[in-house]
Amino acid sequence: MGTRLGCLICGDVIESKSRHDFVRCKCGGIFVDGGDDYVRAGAEDLKYIMPGSVDLSELDKIPLAVRLKVATDLRLPLSILKE
């Protein structure tokens, strides 16, 4: 399946399909890496990440402190931070 993100700047939906498969959108605003093995994603500014494009089922693999920052920056409900 992989890890997918959408970019609000250029409209690209990008997917990392395997370990070390680093992918950027066409404008360079966001990136994703790791496929199903690990999740590494980012953006020049987290507001560039398309709402709903983050697979919240994968959040349990991310440390709580990182989840809090992502939830705050993306204005997601803090209920996603359950341990």
Image: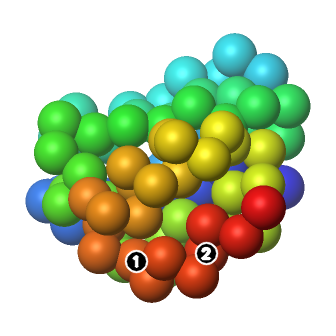
For disc 1, the neighbor class at 10 Å (few under 14, some 14 to 19, many from 20) is some
Figure quadrant of residue 25: top left
**CA distance for labels 1 and 2:** 8 Å
Task: Label 1, secondary structure: give it.
Answer: loop
The residue singled out by tag 1 in the image is 76
Report the quarter where the N terminus lies. bottom right
Task: Check contact, mark 1 vs mark 2: CB within 8 A.
Answer: yes
Q: Which mark is residue 38?
A: none
Please provide percent x and percent y for residue 49: 31, 60
Q: Is residue 61 above or below residue 24?
A: below
State the residue at coordinates (62%, 47%).
64
Q: Residue at position x 68%, y 42% from top?
A: 62
Image position of 34 (left or right of 48): right
Instruction: Tell whether 10 sits left or right of 14.
Output: left
Quarter where residue 73 is shown: bottom left
Mark 2: which amino acid?
A: Ile
Estimate how packed mark 2 is, as few (under 14), some (14 to 19) or many (20 or more) residues with alpha carbons within 10 Å: some
Q: Residue 47 at what x, y percent from top left?
A: 19, 60
Q: Residue 81 appears at what percent x and percent y?
A: 62, 67
| 3 lies above or below 47 | above
The answer to whether residue 17 is visible is no
Q: Is residue 67 in view from this perspective?
A: yes
Foreground pick, 65 / 58: 65
**Residue 43 left/right relative to 22:** left
Report the residue marked by disc 2: 80
Judging depth in this view, the residue of 39 and 23 nearest the camera is 39
Residue type indicated by callout 1? Leu
Q: Secondary structure at mark 2?
A: helix
> What's the residue at 76%, 31% (across, down)?
38
Front residue of 33 and 76 = 76
